[in-house]
Image: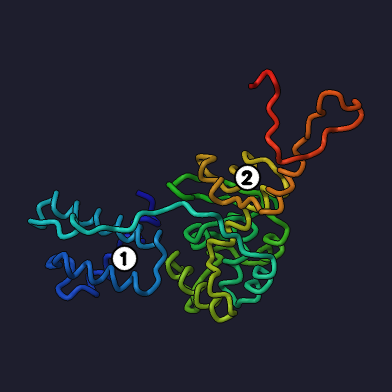
């Protein structure tokens, strides 16, 4: 299991143990249902609730299989299911605004928007990982290492920085992915951008690469996805590009028309005699 997943599970279970009336070990089904309902009423996203369910179910399955608990209180709970939605890249105007945040979040914004790094990768990013040409990601999603080309904006931002972690808290300590997400959310909300989250900068990175270069395999490599199916979830095809693609479909010449004149575009369904 990736380190970031272990850390996320530990943080969630710690909060759940604190929030439940009698802690994790003595929780009844109705206690966990009430906790879940509270998070639902707070507007938690469906995918977030699905992740909560995954961690909580995994914990109680392990606790029962290991003999620590006699019964599993979550077997009858209906958890949200994750769904793949449309990518939500931030706009260039929104990017210009979030680039005004103070450090250390500005560095996080730059690494997400111009290198496509995830929160865990940003928290672990070090100055010595970045050269003028290549950014090394020692441990990406799933534990795999990777590299991405260095954008000039990233290089100009970090080139004079000392070796070591690029993002530290105000006490000079390392940050966690959860810390990054929370601080970014507070900062973006303060800018009047309540719908913007740090991961949407990665969506912008992938979407623009696909739009500018037009090669899904190139986009896949830049996003460091194992499967191209994952890449498709990060690359928004705009309405304008879809309309252009449809409008550029060629219209065949109709029999009997001059060879130099294409047949008229029409919505009528024409059926040739051979097709009848």
Q: Considering the image in quadrants, where does the C terminus appear? A: top right
Residue lying at the far left of the rendered structure: 70
Furthest residue in direction bottom, as rendered: 190
Give the residue number, with chain letter if any, for mark 2: 219
Left or right: residue 106 compared with residue 240: left
Q: Give left or right: position of 75 versus 198.
A: left
Residue at x 59% of width, y 43% of height = 220
Residue 17 in the image: state x and y as whole percent: 22, 70
Q: Disc 2 versus disc 1: distance between alpha carbons?
A: 33 Å
Residue under the point 47% across and 68% down = 181
Circle 1: element type: helix
Q: Is residue 199 above or below residue 43?
A: above
Q: Check disc 2 and report its element: helix, strand or loop.
A: helix
Q: Nearer the viewer, residue 1 or 124?
A: 1
Residue 203 on image: x %, y %: 58, 56
Q: Residues within 10 Å of mark 1 (few under 14, many from 20)?
A: some
The answer to whether residue 30 is left or right of residue 149 is left
Would you identify the image quadrant in which residue 57 lies? Answer: bottom left
Instruction: Identify the residue under disc 1.
Output: 12
Q: Are marks 2 and 1 in contact (CB under 8 Å)?
A: no
Residue 77 is situated, as x and y percent measured from the top left of the image, at 22, 59
> Which of the two discs, 2 and 1, labels the residue nearer the N terminus?
1
Q: Residue at x 26, y 59 (%)?
A: 56
């Amino acid at each position: 299991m990736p380190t970031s997943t272990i850390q996320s599970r530990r943080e969630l279970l710690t909060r759940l143990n604190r929030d439940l009336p009698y802690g994790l070990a003595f929780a009844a089904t109705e206690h966990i249902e009430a906790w879940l309902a509270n998070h639902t009423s707070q507007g938690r996203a469906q995918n977030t609730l699905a992740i909560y369910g995954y961690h909580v179910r995994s914990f109680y399955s392990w606790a029962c299989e290991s003999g620590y608990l006699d019964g599993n209180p979550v077997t009858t709970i209906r958890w949200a299911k994750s769904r793949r939605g449309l990518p939500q890249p931030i706009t260039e105007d929104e990017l210009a605004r979030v680039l005004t945040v103070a450090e250390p979040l500005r560095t996080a914004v730059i690494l997400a928007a111009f290198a496509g790094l995830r929160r865990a990768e940003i928290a672990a990013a070090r100055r010595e990982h970045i050269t003028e040409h290549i950014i090394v990601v020692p441990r990406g999603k799933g534990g795999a290492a990777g590299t991405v080309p260095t954008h000039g904006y990233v290089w100009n931002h970090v080139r004079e920085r000392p070796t070591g972690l690029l993002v530290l808290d105000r006490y000079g300590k390392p940050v966690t992915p959860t810390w990054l997400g929370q601080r970014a959310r507070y900062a973006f909300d303060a800018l009047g951008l309540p719908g913007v989250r740090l991961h949407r900068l990665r969506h912008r990175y992938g979407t623009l690469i696909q739009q500018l270069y037009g090669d899904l395999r190139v986009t896949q490599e830049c996003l460091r996805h194992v499967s191209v199916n994952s890449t498709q979830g990060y690359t928004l095809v705009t309405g304008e590009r879809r309309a252009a693609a449809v409008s550029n479909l060629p219209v065949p010449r109709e029999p009997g028309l001059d060879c130099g004149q294409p047949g008229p575009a029409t919505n009528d369904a024409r059926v040739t005699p051979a097709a009848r």
